[in-house]
Image (cartoon, helix red, strand yellow):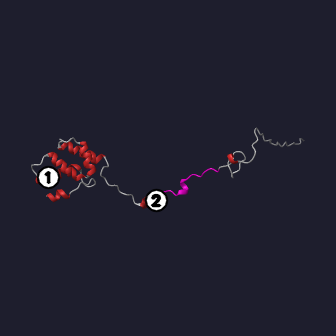
Amino acid sequence: MENDFENVIFNSEKDKPRTWFFKQKDRLSALHPDMSDTMINMKISRKFGAEREHAIKCRCVEPCSTEDYINAMEDIITRTRIGKTWTKIPMESKMVSRIPREDRRPEKPVLKCHKCGSTSHLANTCTKKTKINEVKAIEEVHCTEEKE
């Protein structure tokens, strides 16, 4: 019976907190009938792991009833990720969802000089003279039609 208590560690994936706690409490009270509730709670809290044990002790004030202790324990185990293990996603499923690099990037616009329109340089390094207020003449071709 003592080995059963010593070898058991809480696993949140397999065990429900309330039933696991009462099972361990029954084992301890069978081994040590004169042990107080606070001592039983402290011994059981060591079986949760260091992070959960610390979180439960911070939540409960020292002269804590078993009901308050169980409520705090259930809150911490069900609502937080303290002490839970992370499972890795297999690489095969990640590779399927990836988009090739070429398709993800939008094409960059071609940079060109604002003064002369060339793509070989930008306006700050342009060697051509700038003509202020330059007006380009547009030739208009007049077509004369012969009237009959």
Q: Which residues are magenta?
A: 95-110
Image location (x, y in percent) of residue 121 = 68, 50
* Residue type pointed to by label 1: Leu
| Image side of residue 137 versus residue 80, left or right | right
Identity of the residue furthest to the left in this view: 34
Frontmost of labels 1 and 2 is 1
Residue where numbered disc 1 is placed: 28
| Image side of residue 54 versus residue 111, left or right | left
Residue 96 within the segment the image draws in magenta: yes
User: Residue 7's quadrant in the figure?
Assistant: bottom left
Indicate which disc, 1 or 2, sits on the residue closer to the N terminus.
1
Image mark for residue 63: none
Identity of the residue furthest to the right in this view: 148
Image mark for residue 96: 2
What residue lies at 16% left-to-right and 47% top-to-bottom? 39
Residue 133 within the segment the image draws in magenta: no
Image location (x, y in percent) of residue 1 = 13, 58
The span from disc 1 to disc 2 (Cα, nearest Å) is 52 Å
What residue lies at 14% left-to-right and 46% top-to-bottom? 37
